[in-house]
Amino acid sequence: MFRSASRLHLRTLLDGFGIYRDPRVIGMLFLGFSAGLPLLLVGGTFTAWLRDLGVELATIGFLSWVGIAHSVKVLWAPVIDRLPVPLLTRLLGRRRGWMLLAQLLIAVALFGMATTDPATSRLWVAVLAVIVAFASATQDIAVDAWRVEALEARHQGAMAASYVTGYRVALLVAGAGCLHIASIGGWSLAYGAMAALMAVGIGTTLLVKEPTPQAQRQTAEMEARVAAYLSSTAHGLARQRVGAWFIGAVVCPFADFFQRYGRAALVILLFIGLFRVSDIFMGVMANPFYLDIGFTKSEIANIAAAFGLAMTLSGAALGGALVSRFGIAPLLIITAFMAPITNLAFSWLALMGPVKWGLVMAIVADNITGGMATAVFIAYLSSLTNSAYTATQYALFSSLMTLPGQFAGGFTGLLAAAVGWPEFYLITALTGVPAILLAALLLRVAHPDRSRSLSEATSAGEQETG
């Protein structure tokens, strides 16, 4: 009987992995690569290029501000939700039109950077880097919206895992790969090659299908009331239209979220902001910790970086498969609990010292759990969106997901210096307790699987009666 039950569980898990054969999940792999490629090319790799050419540190510091585009993308996400791209939207659809426009801009701007010397044309290079950064953030918004709308909530874990895999591979290519090309053929060749690799995303955008999300009647009625009210005012026609567009694109996405979830919306937003705090706290000090307790740079590169990446991707794939089979709610509780608990492995490692097998065990525990948590959490955020406002709402959630942890992470150095490494990682584990409690509360006030099912059932019922 025990053997039969084990076989049944194994078959169920293997069935969950079958979702990775879906063409949309496969397409997400290449779109993830396209999304990850530009990030370092206006970040770490870009600063390495500038310094290699002798550009002063002050200028490099100022140019690093171009990366802010990804942190404020929620500001123009409403435009991507509502405004069509001339010709492209008609040919490709709402999401793919914006994706293709952003990808073309990135490729052209990267090629422009490849043919420009930053030592003599700093302003022009800065302008091109800004174009890459804003086009990259725009691509992120459109790709996230396409992903959420392409498959139902229970398959979003697999979509997230596929996206993360492509994204991480792109980071390797744009980081180590670009540096290797530059060492052989120069920076112009390296950035020219990166521009050519944007063909991966362009080709995928042309091949995948545009999703056809079903708008909910409640959303249409809310926007109709706004339009009716504005038409009754004394404002001119042009002002009425601009006002209606602004309210529909900017105000309604937030009003819709609070209308659907009521008081539970505040619990949800608090949970989103706290879920990854323990991971971000730990990650900021990871490399200084490894060096302080005695690991060599090569050991860190081989175990924490290369092996750790493999474990993260494995965890993401496992999380996507489990969400596909068992839903979001149970995995959300499990990962909310496991993510901070695995931080204790680093407290244990700090007491042991530079033992390789100890580092391997800690990396296995932390990175597999982190990969699972990423896939599950992205699936959860996707389940919260309304298809009428996917880009805007998901941009808000994804920004909120990292902002508290990134801000608090700035104080982790002071904390580690004050208490020592074993106690530091114990404290980082404790920062995950609020997320665990909020995850349990969400099962009572806004169950991730039931709320989505109810939303979809209501939408389907409205279409039948309409």
Image (cartoon, rainbow, N blue to C red):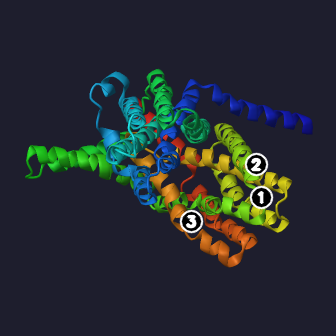
What kind of residue is marked 1?
Phe
**Residue 257 image point, x, y percent:** 41, 52
Q: How many marks?
A: 3
Q: Is tag 1's residue or tag 2's residue first in the polypeptide sequence?
A: 1
Q: Is residue 333 visible?
A: yes
Question: 15 or 378, which lies in front?
Answer: 378
Q: Residues within 10 Å of mark 2 (few under 14, many from 20)?
A: some
Distance from disc 1 to disc 2, alpha carbons, whole Å, reads 10 Å
Q: From the image, state whether disc 1 or disc 3 is nearer to you.
A: 1
First reached walking from the N terminus: tag 1 or tag 3: 1
Residue under label 3, please give it: 409
Q: CA distance from mark 1 to mark 3?
A: 23 Å
Q: Amino acid at mark 3?
A: Gly
The vertical placement of 151 against 397, above or below, is: above
Tag 1's secondary structure?
A: loop
| Residue at the disc numbered 2 | 303
Whether residues under marks 1 and 2 lie with C-beta atoms below 8 angstroms apart, the answer is yes
Neighbor class of circle 1 (other Cα within 10 Å; few <14, some 14-19, many 20+) is some
Q: Regarding mark 3 in the picture, which secondary structure is present there?
A: helix
Asked if residue 77 shows in the view, the reply is no
Residue count near mark 3 (Cα–Cα under 10 Å), binned few <14, some 14–19, many ≥20:
many
Q: Which of disc 2 and disc 3 is earlier in sequence?
A: 2
Judge from the rendering whether residue 137 lies leftward or rightward of residue 420; answer left or right: left
Separation of residues labelled 3 and 2 (CA atoms): 24 Å
Secondary structure, mark 2, is helix
- Rendered image: mark on residue 82: none
The residue beneath circle 1 is: 295
Please state the horizontal and vertical placement of residue 425, each as a whole percent of the image: 71, 67
Q: Position of residue 236 (x, y in %)?
A: 8, 47
Q: Amino acid at mark 2?
A: Ile
